[in-house]
Image (tube, rainbow, N blue to C red):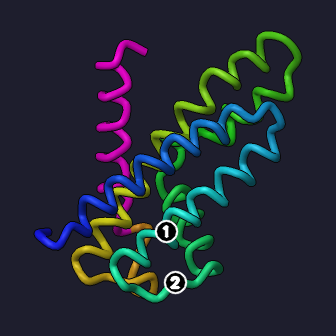
Amino acid sequence: MSDGRSTRGDLTIARHVALSAGAGAIPLPVADYAVLTAVQVNLVRRLCAIYGVPFSREAAKALVAGLLGAAAPGLSFAAASSLKTLPGAGTLAGLVSAPALAAAATFAAGQVFRHHLETGGSLLTFDANRMKAEFDRRMQEADAARAAAGR
């Protein structure tokens, strides 16, 4: 878009991806998920503001959960987070995998929501099941970028 909203949307997504990685690094399994959800809902709120779309916290929370739920079983942040409950190697494995999964999921969700809002959609017209393929494609993009970065 020539009005700069797409660029602002991408910058907003990038900031929230970094915040999500931090949420994934929280060593407490329930706390990391709660913070990640808050980061993703805030991302949707900010994207709605950029695109002039009415925002509802409850709707955004349900849509984020629906989108991530529709993407399962490929997305397993909950599994990575639950590893943190296992002493030693489990905790280490959870702390290594959860930040990357959280960041990738936030990138993918952000891109899906940005595109939906950019093309005239609203929270009321967002269909998580219909957006699953786009979410999966964006997760693959995030995985490829992480692999190219040598992680």
Depth check: 127 or 4 in front?
4
Q: CA distance from mark 1 to mark 2?
A: 8 Å
Residue 6 falls in image quadrant = bottom left
The residue positioned 52% from the left and 84% from the top of the image is 55
Query: Which residue in the structure is indicated by mark 1?
Result: 44
Left or right: 99, with 82 as reference point: left
Where is residue 19 shown, x and y percent of the image? 58, 45
Q: Which circle marks residue 55 in the picture?
A: 2
Q: Magenta residues: mostly which secondary structure?
A: helix
Left or right: 145, with 127 as reference point: left
Q: Which three-letter amino acid code belongs to the residue tagged 2?
A: Phe
Query: Which residues are drawn in magenta?
Result: 130-151
> Local crowd at mark 2 within 10 Å, few (<14), some, or many (≥20)?
some
Is residue 96 in the magenta section? Answer: no
Q: What is the quadrant of the C terminus in the image?
A: top left
Q: Is 145 situated above or below 117? A: above
Residue 150 falls in image quadrant = top left
Q: Residue most toward the left?
A: 2
Where is residue 4 shown, x and y percent of the image? 21, 67
Q: Which circle marks residue 32 in the picture?
A: none
Q: Which three-letter amino acid code belongs to the residue tagged 1?
A: Val
* Circles 1 and 2 in contact, beta carbons < 8 Å: yes
Q: Is 151 situated above or below 24? A: above
> Local crowd at mark 1 within 10 Å, few (<14), some, or many (≥20)?
many
